[in-house]
Image (cartoon, rainbow, N blue to C red):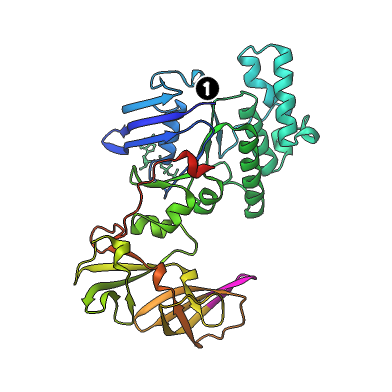
Amino acid sequence: MAEVKVRDLVKVYGRQLAVRGIDLDIPDGAFVVLVGPSGCGKSTTLRMIAGLESISHGELLIDGKRANDLPSRDRGVAMVFQTYALYPHLTVKENLAFSLKLAKVDPADRERRITGAIEALELQPYLDRRPSELSGGQRQRVAMGRAIVREPEVFLFDEPLSNLDAKLRNQMRVEIKRLQHRLGVTTIYVTHDQIEAMTLADVIVVMKDGEIAQQGTPLDVFENPASKFVASFIGSPQMNFFDGVIKQTDAGFAFVTPDMTIPLEADKYQGALRDGQRVTGGLRPEDIIPHGHGMQPEGGLSIKAEVSLTELLGNESLLFARCGTVEFVARMQQPRVVKDSEFLEFHIAGSRLHLFDADTELSLRTTRNDNFNEEERE
Ligand SMILES: Nc1ncnc2c1ncn2[C@@H]1O[C@H](COP(=O)(O)OP(=O)(O)OP(=O)(O)O)[C@@H](O)[C@H]1O
């Protein structure tokens, strides 16, 4: 196992900057997820760590040693891809053995490692099958087995679950998390799926345009998004946004839109509030609560809104509603049938409001700058 550090990492393709000087500190045994929209540079970052792409600028340290120019096989990393990359003409067992034979690992050790992987991934029933005779989930398990037998210092996963259906994806997600806990191997995992990121990571690194938009524990990033981009990317359905201004009166500061006025707790913003400042307010669907459905926090305010559409999800519903000029999504716990065009009262949990500067789109709340912290991971 190893710690991985990245300093000012840059990747240039021709005239395009794909990765723009990122820093990462990944402690031994941590599970870090790089997440972000398509093209944000997460795979390129992973591939530079793997040694599959050259590093244009900056430094990669694996266990304190500069690894920029080390061949991939000498970095102690094993990568699992979306496309499995299994040898089609070899059986499962032969696929597991392949890299070990190539590396001339002695037969007894080879057998021990293969047996370990077979047990860890419950591959026993499939050992003599070829990849074409396996389901997607089974293939992905073999691909993970091929990484495990190499006993790497670092696991690198590049969207390993993208080709699986939703049910299998959830199942494999749990398996990956369990396996990583059991083996304790430092893991860097790339996905564009924020649910995968939230559920797997000790630390989430949200990327945008080749840069890190925010890093922190999943809860911290969810509770304290540093920008409108992060707020909209993490959380499903996404946060509702309302254009408005800050107003200062004798009663204090408030966030004001044409349809609502939400009093603000100024001390949360540490002097960042300015009278007349144009801002975007953000409320998550669970913080707009239909009356009689879920906890109604003290304070805040009520608004009446017309429901245009309901999505029944079983244990909850999503209500798409309109109040004046504003449309929003609210989450209804213990759902009942809501008719289209029905008017409902919604409680706005004002204390849960997020505010972003309208121009910079950065949060007005002081967020901790969320480098990885060993205590938080415990
Ligand atoms: N071999 C290459 N040559 C030129 N440009 C590339 C190459 N590989 C990636 N890029 C560009 O670099 C940027 C980052 O790509 P990268 O694959 O790292 O993004 P990503 O966040 O992993 O996206 P996705 O989720 O779509 O895989 C993109 O704009 C992409 O077009």
Q: Position of residue 316 (x, y in %)?
A: 60, 72
Crowdedness of circle 1 by 10 Å Cα count: few (<14), some, many (20+)? Answer: some
Write the residue at 56% across / 86% down. 339
Residue segment shown in magenta: 310-318
Q: Is mark 1 within 8 Å of ligand 1?
A: no
Determine the image quadrant of residue 88. top right
Q: Residue at x 47, y 85 (%)?
A: 345
Q: What is the secondary structure assignment of the residue under circle 1?
A: loop
Disc 1 marks a residue whose amino acid type is Gly
**Residue 207 appears in the figure:** no
Residue 43: x %, y % from top left:
44, 38
Q: Residue at x 22, y 78 (%)?
A: 249
Q: Position of residue 143 (x, y in %)?
A: 63, 33
From the image, give the main secondary structure of the stretch colored magenta.
Answer: strand
Magenta stretch containing residue 172, yes or no? Answer: no
Q: Looking at the rendering, which quadrant does residue 150 occupy?
A: top right
In this rendered view, identify the residue nearer to me: 89 or 378. 378
Where ligand 1 lies, by quadrant? top left
Q: Is residue 201 visible?
A: yes
Residue at mark 1: 76
Image quadrant occupied by the C terminus: top right
Left or right? Give the position of 205 relative to 266: right
Viewport quadrant of the N terminus: top right
The image quarter containing residue 126 is top right
Q: Is residue 285 above or below residue 122?
A: below
